Amino acid sequence: MRKTKTSLLAAVLAVFMILVSVTTACSSNSEETGQSSNSPTQSAAPQDNSNEATTYPIQTDKNLTYWAGINSNLAGIRSSLDEVPFFQEWQKRTGVPLTFISPTAGQQKEALNVMLASGEMPDVIEYSWISFPGGPEKAIKDGYIISLNELIDQHAPNLKKYLEEHPEVDRLVKTDTGNYYGFPFIRGDESLLVFQGPIIRQDWLDELGLEMPTTIDEWYTVLKAFKEKKGATAPLSFLSEGRLAALGNGAIIGAFDINQGFYLDNGQIKYGPAEPRYKDFLATMSKWYAEGLLDKNIATTDQKTLDANIISGATGVSLGNAGSQLGKWTPLLSEKDPRAVLAPAPYPVLNKGDVPRFGQLDNAFAVNGTAAITSKSKNPELAVKMLDYAYSEEGHMLFNFGIEGVSYTMENGYPTYTDLMMKNPDNLAPAQALSLYIRGNYFGPFVQDKRYSEQYNVLQSQKDSIEVWKTDAKSTKLPPITATPEESTELAKIMTDVDTLVNEMTLKIILGSEPLSSYESYMKKMETLNFDRAIEIQEAALDRFNKR
Amino acid sequence: MKTKKSGLERTFDICLYAVLSVLVVVTLYPLIYVAFASISDAAYIVAHKGILWKPVGVNFEAYKSVFANDAIWSGYKNTLFIIVFGVMLNLFMTSLGAYVLSRKNVMLNKPIMIFIIITMFFHGGLIPFYLVVKGVGLLDTLWAPIIPFAINTFNLIILRTSFQSIPDSLEEAAKMDGANHFVILFRIILPLSLPIMAVMTLYYAVDKWNGWFYSSIFISDRDLYPLQLVIREILIANSTEGMTAGGSGNDLFQIGETIKYATIMVSTLPILMVYPYLQRYFVKGVMVGSLKG
Amino acid sequence: MRPSASPSHAGKPVKSKEFVVSRLVKDLALNRYLYIMMIPVLAYYILFQYGPMYGAIIAFKEYSPIKGILGSDWVGLTHFQSFFESYYFWRILKNTLLLSLYSLCFEFPAPIILALLINEVRNKRFKSIVQSVTYMPHFISLIVICGIIKDFTNSGGLINTFITYLGGDGQAMLQKPELFRSIYIISDIWQGMGWTSIIYLAALMNVDQEQFEAARIDGAGRLRQIWNVSLPGILPTIIIMLILRIGNLLSVGFEKIILLYNPAIYDTADVISSFVYRKGLLEFGWSYSAAVGLFNSVVNLILLVLANRLSKKFSENSLW
């Protein structure tokens, strides 16, 4: 028997060795490609030191390959980017012919992974590079993509100008060591950064003669009234994936002067659940739950349950986005109950008159759709010139409004979408029609214009929401810091356990299956998980960011 | 005596039919739910709570928008190709392997069996697999979801077990007549194994039908997308996550929920039809007849 | 096994080696056509299954896509250590095993019973209806199935309506740790029973009809026939399925778990795969998940070998 085993092992090993040697030969190719990476950065230094603006269309006989996902709005309308009018116009205007490669929707990560492993890279890859393992810095260091500092300096006057005028954005789009790694997607106006907050049944408030609630105590009164007088079975309900996901940006919990995850407090990194005030938050939530003010199924509430709650009138207060929630619920609800009115409500605070310190606020640099140039590109210069077009005046109009006379017309100096966009004759929804002609309604390497959302958000409540949901989150929001590759592994290891612990504690205490007093014992466990180290890593990352 | 026994028999039958009827009702529900939801009015489905007894606000919009998508048709075509050639290859390879491994007195069968079983537990992961498929030159062809998946080890083992239960006497008799192994396999073993071959056909066909992950990695030419990949893109496009974060998109959401169910119907009904067709191979007594003959 | 590798093993007793070699040569000659038939099958396994297998070494490396699998740095057992030392290691291991064992006890026999019952139905039409309908839930995507489960189990759902009607107390069932395993297993049975029963039905078709007749002549009732004829007839299939199932004891997929669970029931619902999934959300843990996968595979393989040995001892059936 034993002999059998050893000989089996020997056989397996033999096969293995052969295969390894075979595959070594195969994969050495891909390694070489990785190593040859650094040279283009230098060789890219142009012979003609022309710092002047490029004239479009560029005269070139070269062709670039461009890797980018197809926006989901286009699924079923066009099967490849070549067929999309926007991308056709873009090539025409820049004069650079592009060959598009698009991964399957939802499979970008896997597709990128095998593409990089196989060593065959296109010229340009549009991806959320900030989420690349080890960060964009590592992608450059390891020779995937190239640092664009010189190229932008010499061949991208439009982007350069924008970043010079907006130093706060400039800080976001480069790495800790100051490398530019891609052409970023920038939200060009503050009003584009706020799109989430509390939503309330205004008609119920009016009917019951209640004021718009602003403090936690007023929320309590309102919820109680909704439950008792309006028969709401789940007066407050929101998405709860993980640990009450909808509170992730600081709604409700922000009233207790903390946030769900890491945040900034006077320049210091803090972690909400580790702060003593987290206990107050838990006390309030568990009280609401016990009194039936919070959805009974709060631990399992998903999008579908929430939709049903709102539209059936079981819920009077929720949290959501201006587009995907307020915009969806309003028409559905009024179909069922014509008097129903949904309105944005301010983030609650503890004391009347306080300005909420926490709330949803996006960074001007949105991580999606950063166009980076790969080390395999033979024409990085051309690629940079091509990409820079988007940040020019003309390019800005193309990306946000499309083609004049087709997708928009100028009315009193205001680019107005045509009926082809907003009331499409082929019955395309505006989101779909827009995706054919612009990129302004999703993302990409350009600066987003607020005049897009002004026209796209048609409901009054959506327009109001930007003002109502304003908070002081700028002072507490953690910038997009990146840990070093080694630290990020360590951080992830610690935070997986910490998250599990905190999620579990939070829900158990709120649901009443464990008493509030167990909070302390959980905090003791958290210390054993080496949580202090996590804070240390985050602080170091913040330091590096601040020094940019 | 006799009456008592048939009384017992009757009780048994009543229980049998009762239990199975309940089972039918209970297992039918998810399909009915999907079917009803797919032809309901999106606005009502979103607001709906509890059991769905009937479609709410009948509406065929979702189907219209699914079928308006040209990619669906090329998806059906590609999937059909993958199933026809894929399952043929699967059945051929699997019966070859199962036949050899079910023979007795073959010295190397045991090590080969272990060699094969090991592959059920150890995998190299996506990237090495991708590199092999690329090396063989199958990338971006419809053979990519076929050849690298020629054998499913689980199915191979099941088929081998079934072959083993066929009496040796048949093989011996054929050998006497001078039949070689191919003849024995295709003329004797396979005709005797129609029910299990039907199962194999079904299991492989369903695998091919539902498979999308490797196609998404190996095929980048959108004209070659199989149905499930097309369906997936439609589903993602109509899910909330698919909507651009932060942007707005009130118009698409409403129909999204019913489209989800319509695409499920479109992508499952054809394959559901396969089984009733294969059921006719589930015939008892094939064995007895041939043994006697 | 002995013969295949023996040429490379010099340390073995000369006598047995020669004996084995000569036997092997004879065997190769005698069964040459069988081996020739096996060539395409073996070629498939070598190329597409063993070919990529070197990738498993990333479990011992810090995989970086750029450096490639072979070029990444070795880190030894770091990932294994980090998994075993995880604060929640014992809990997720326990939950995985318990869920698997419950599934073995309740989910495994269900399709067998269903097949035996269907086999007893004399009415052809009813029989084919039962078969076709019970296998349908297999085709409904997990997301929809889990949506229905959530719908049924929430505080105002079907099951609770029923319980309240009977005078019980309605509750959000997926927030109760003690109910999770039952919900998981029952819904699994619901979805998969018909599909798996097809294998057993096919096996039942091969049971010799004469045995039924003989049993009937002996005056055996239906239940007795099931017990004495049908069940033994499909026993080889059952045992092989059981061995394969045991070889999967540590594999509880994450998809259904993450669709159903929430932190309030981590106590019973969090398993190895869901834990690794959560970890993967925080980082690209290729190497880590490869290490966990390798651990699972090794344990599963050991269990399979044990099950196979036991089966060989107590029945005639075995995988090899």
Image: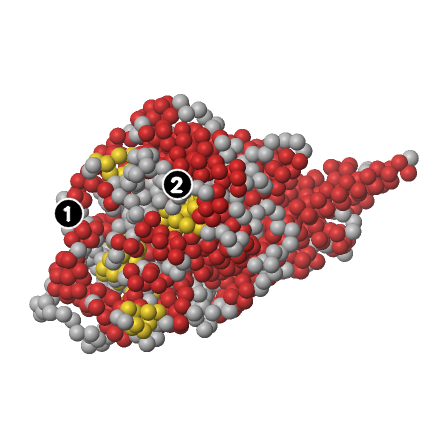
Say which chain tag 1 marks.
Answer: A
Give whichever of B46, A541 is nearer the camera: B46
Residue shown at the point (59%, 46%) measured from the top left: B50
Task: Name the foreground residue: A277 vs A529.
Answer: A277
- Spatial CA span between label 1 and label 2: 41 Å
Residue A376: x %, y % from top left: 23, 62
x, y percentage for residue A434?
Answer: 37, 66
Q: Residue at x 67, y 53 (%)?
A: C132
| Foreground: disc 1 or disc 2 | 2
- Labels 1 and 2: the sequence-earlier one: 2
Disc 1 target residue: A548
Q: Quadrant of the C terminus of chain C?
A: top right
Residue A197 visible? The answer is yes
Chain where mark 2 sits: A
Q: Residue A144 placed where, x, y %?
A: 24, 55
> What kind of element bears circle 1?
loop
Image side of residue B50 versus residue A206, left or right: right
Amino acid carrying label 2: it is Pro
Q: Amino acid at mark 1?
A: Arg
Q: Which of A246 and C97 lies nearest the eye of the viewer?
A: A246
Q: Residue at x 39, y 57 (%)?
A: A460
Label 2 element class: loop
Dots 1 and 2 on the same chain: yes
Residue ID at (28%, 41%): A355
Q: Position of residue A83 (x, y in %)?
A: 38, 72
Identify residue for label 2: A213
Q: Looking at the image, what colour scheme do you see?
A: secondary structure
